[in-house]
Image (cartoon, grey):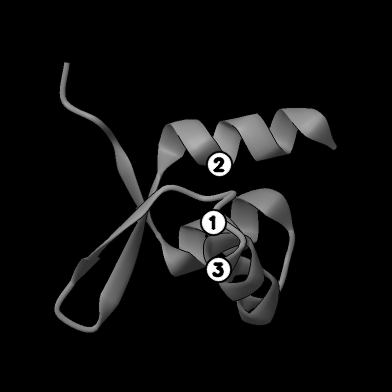
Amino acid sequence: MKEKWLKSKEVMKTLKISACDVMHLREEGKLKFTKQGNAFLYSAESVALIQNKR
């Protein structure tokens, strides 16, 4: 199954957090991500895990 990736704005809207908070989660290794050009894409699965912990 192909993994679903979300853009930063989608993550911000889903988790109701700021761009800075998304960056901190990424740097702490809590969000699985990949980079395409200048854009960061986040694993929908890791976003869901964070959402469930709230």
Task: Name which of mark 3 and mark 1 comes first in the sequence.
Answer: 1
Q: Give the Cα separation between the discs numbered 1 and 2.
A: 7 Å
Q: Is 50 positioned to the left or the right of 45 in the image? A: right
Which amino acid is tagged 1?
A: Val
Q: Residue lying farthest front? A: 28
Badge 1: residue crowd in 10 Å (few <14, some 14–19, many ≥20)? many
Q: Which mark is residue 27?
A: 3
Above or below — where is 28 with respect to 48?
below
Q: Crowdedness of circle 2 by 10 Å Cα count: few (<14), some, many (20+)? A: many
Q: Amino acid at mark 2?
A: Val
Q: Are marks 3 and 2 in contact (CB under 8 Å)?
A: no
Of callouts 3 and 2, the N-terminal one: 3
Q: Position of residue 53 (x, y in %)?
A: 80, 31
For badge 3, the amino acid type reads: Glu
Instruction: Give the Cα separation between the discs numbered 3 and 2.
Output: 14 Å
Residue 27 in picture, x, y percent from top left = 55, 68
Dividing the image into 4 quarters, which one contains the C terminus? top right
Residue occupying the point 66% across, 81% down: 20
Query: Dot 2 corresponds to which residue?
Result: 47
Choose the circle earlier in sequence order: 1 or 2: 1
**Residue shown at the point (36%, 55%) measured from the top left:** 33
Asked if disc 1 and disc 2 are in contact, CB closer than 8 Å, the reply is yes
Q: Position of residue 31 (x, y in %)?
A: 52, 50
Nearest to viewer (mark 1 / mark 2) = 2
Residue 46 numbered tag: none
- Kindly report the distance in space between the C-alpha atoms of the residues bearing marks 3 and 1: 15 Å
15 lies left or right of 48: right
Quadrant assignment for the N terminus: top left
Residue lying at 33% horizontally and 69% vertically, measured from the top left: 40
